[in-house]
Amino acid sequence: MGKIADNLARIRQSLPEGVTLVAVSKFHPAEALREAYEAGQRVFGESRPQEMTAKCRILPEDIEWHMIGHLQTNKVKYIAPFVSLIHSVDSWRLAETIDREAAKAGRTIDVLLQLHIAQEETKFGWDAAELEHFLQDGRLTGLEHIRIRGLMGMASLTDNMSQVRDEFRTLHRDFVRFREKYLPHMDVLSMGMSGDYPIAIEEGATMVRIGSSIFGRREY
Ligand SMILES: *Cc1c(COP(=O)(O)O)cnc(C)c1O
C-alpha cells in the first residue's frame, strides 16, 4: 500500500459509523488525489475555486467536491455547476450569490453555515446571534436554490485541548438549537481537522475534514 492509502485506512478505522471523512487535498497534486481515489476515497475538500475546478476536470466524475475555504462571491460561478457541498457560507451576501448561481446552473446546492467559534479574530464565520437573526426572519431558509444541511466550524489553533473541546461543544449546542427551532432537516455537523478530530467526534461531529494526516504537509 502507498503512504496515502495507508493513512486513509488508519483514519477510517478510527472513525465511528455515520461520520463522513472529507479528504482535504488543497495544495496537493492530482496524483495524490488519484491515489486516495484508488483507495476508495470519494469525498475531497478544496479551499480555492480555481484549484478545485482544475482538479475536477481531470479526475473521475464520481468524486464529490466540497468547498471548505472562505469563498469570495465573484468565484461562486466557477464551482456552482459541480460542487457537492459548500462548508463555508459565512455571510448573507454569499448565501444569496450561491442561490443565484445555483439557479443559473439549474441546481439546488447543499451548504453548511460556518459559525465563528474560535478565539482568533482571523477565522471566518457568523456569530451565533447574527446567524439566528437571519434564520428568524426567514431570509436564509427562503432561498430556494440552496439547501442548508448543517453547520461548520473551526476550533482555535491551540494546544489547549479543553478550550478546543469547549468550542466544539458550543457549536454542537448551536446545531441542536437551530435544528429544533428553524432547520429540522439539518443532518451535518462539520468539525474537526487532523489535530483535533477525535475530540470533535466525541462532541458530536458527523463530518470531519482531514488533510495533513492523509496527504502529508502542504507546500504553499
Ligand atoms: C486546511 C483545512 C482543513 C484540514 O486541515 P489539516 O490540519 O491539514 O487536517 C480542514 N478544514 C479547513 C476549513 C481547512 O481550511
Image: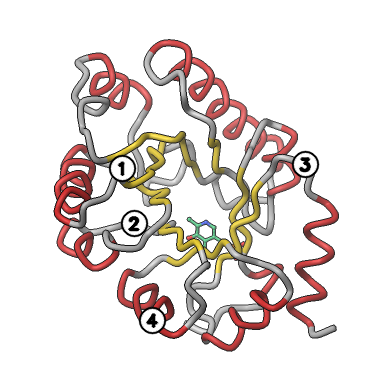
The amino acid type, in three-letter code, at marker 2 is His
Decide if residue 182 is on the left or right side of residue 137: right
Q: Quadrant of the N terminus?
A: bottom right
Decide if residue 45 is on the left or right side of residue 213: left
Residue 50, by quadrant, is: bottom left
Q: Nearer the viewer, residue 120 or 87?
A: 87
Badge nearest the viewer, 3 or 2? 3
The residue that disc 4 covers is 57
Residue 148, position in %: x, y? 37, 34
Q: Local crowd at mark 4 within 10 Å, few (<14), some, or many (≥20)? A: few
Disc number placed over residue 70 in the picture, else none: 2
Residue 13, position in %: x, y? 85, 55
Q: Is mark 2 within 8 Å of ligand 1?
A: no
- Which residue is depicted at the point 23% across and 68% down? 78
Q: Are marks 1 and 4 in contact (CB under 8 Å)?
A: no
Disc 1 to disc 3, how far (Cα)? Answer: 29 Å
Disc number placed over residue 17 in the picture, else none: 3
The residue that disc 1 covers is 90
Q: Secondary structure at mark 4?
A: helix
